[in-house]
Each structure stands twice: as structure tokens, then as C-alpha cells.
Image (cartoon, rainbow, N blue to C red):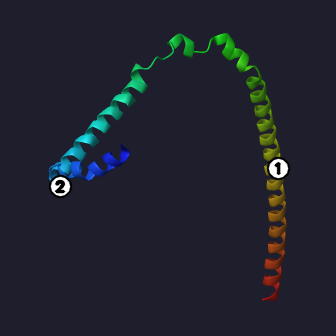
């Protein structure tokens, strides 16, 4: 039976009319358009028509939210205290550096004055 069918296949295909390239192109274009339309319909169904939860089920109750954020406030306070301590330490270092720089300037001024006096005596 299979052998008879396989031997008849070239005869059946040979009886089909010849297809021009424009006809083949138009059929391929139509097939592509149908596939695009089906894809757009499936996307619309997935996004809009599929069963979605009610808004009441998507929101978190205030009590649950407070339970979730219990430790957050403590950590925030801890970080704020660390930041304030670092700022105070930085300010203390800044004042110390300023006093050191002022001391260096004072020493340079004394040396400059002594050099200028020596220079004045030499001439």
C-alpha cells in the first residue's frame, strides 16, 4: 500500500498547476499577516482578559506593613547615629588640621620676618 502511494506522489504533484513567484509571495504574506494577528490576539488575551486578582487582594494591610517594617526604623536610627558621629569626628579633624596649618603659617611668618631682617642688614 505504501509503495503504491509513494509511486503515485510524483504523478499527483505533477498535475498541480505551476505557481508563479508573485502568487507564492502573496500567500506567504497572507500567512505572515494571519500569524501576526493571532499573536496580537494572544497578547491581548494574556494581558487584559485573563483572570486577575481583585484589587483588595493585591494591597497589603496597614498592620501587616507595620509588622514588616518594625526593624527598619531601629536600623535607620542606628545609621543616623553613626552618620552624626562620623560628621562630628570629621569636624574635629578639620579643626585640628586648621590649627596645625595656622601654626605652620605662624612659623613661616616668623622665619620670613627673620630672613627679611637679615636681607636688610646685608645690603
Estimate the spatial distance between the alpha carbons at disc 1 and disc 2, rounded to whole Å: 84 Å
Q: Position of residue 21 (x, y in %)?
A: 17, 55
Q: Residues within 10 Å of mark 2 (few under 14, many from 20)?
A: few
Secondary structure beneath label 2: helix
Q: Is 51 displayed left or right of 73 in the figure?
A: left
Callout in the foreground (1, 2):
2
> What residue sits 22% from the left and 48% below the top?
12
Closer to the camera in the image, 5 or 103: 5
Residue topped by disc 1? 93
Task: Assign the N terminus to one quadrant of the image.
Answer: top left
Q: Which of the labelled discs sits on residue 29, or is there none?
A: none
Please identify the quadrant where the C terminus is shown: bottom right
Asked whether the residues under the numbered discs 1 and 2 touch, taking CB atoms below 8 Å apart as contact, a structural biologist would say no
Q: Nearer the viewer, residue 48 or 42?
A: 42
Q: Is residue 100 above or below residue 35?
A: below
Earlier residue among tags 1 and 2: 2
Residue 110's quadrant in the figure?
Answer: bottom right
Q: Which mark is residue 21?
A: 2
Secondary structure beneath label 1? helix
Which residue appears at 42% of the width and 26% of the height? 46
The residue drawn where x is 79% and y is 54% is 98
Amino acid at each position: 500500500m505504501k509503495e503504491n502511494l509513494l509511486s503515485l506522489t510524483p504523478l499527483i504533484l505533477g498535475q498541480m498547476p505551476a505557481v508563479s513567484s508573485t502568487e507564492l509571495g502573496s500567500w506567504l504574506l497572507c500567512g505572515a499577516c494571519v500569524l501576526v494577528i493571532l499573536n496580537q490576539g494572544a497578547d491581548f488575551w494574556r494581558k487584559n482578559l485573563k483572570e486577575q486578582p481583585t484589587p483588595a487582594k493585591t494591597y497589603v494591610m496597614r498592620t501587616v506593613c507595620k509588622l514588616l517594617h518594625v526593624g527598619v526604623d531601629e536600623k535607620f536610627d542606628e545609621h543616623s547615629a553613626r552618620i552624626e558621629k562620623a560628621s562630628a569626628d570629621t569636624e574635629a579633624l578639620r579643626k585640628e588640621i586648621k590649627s596645625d596649618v595656622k601654626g605652620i603659617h605662624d612659623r613661616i611668618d616668623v622665619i620670613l620676618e627673620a630672613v627679611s631682617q637679615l636681607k636688610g642688614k646685608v645690603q
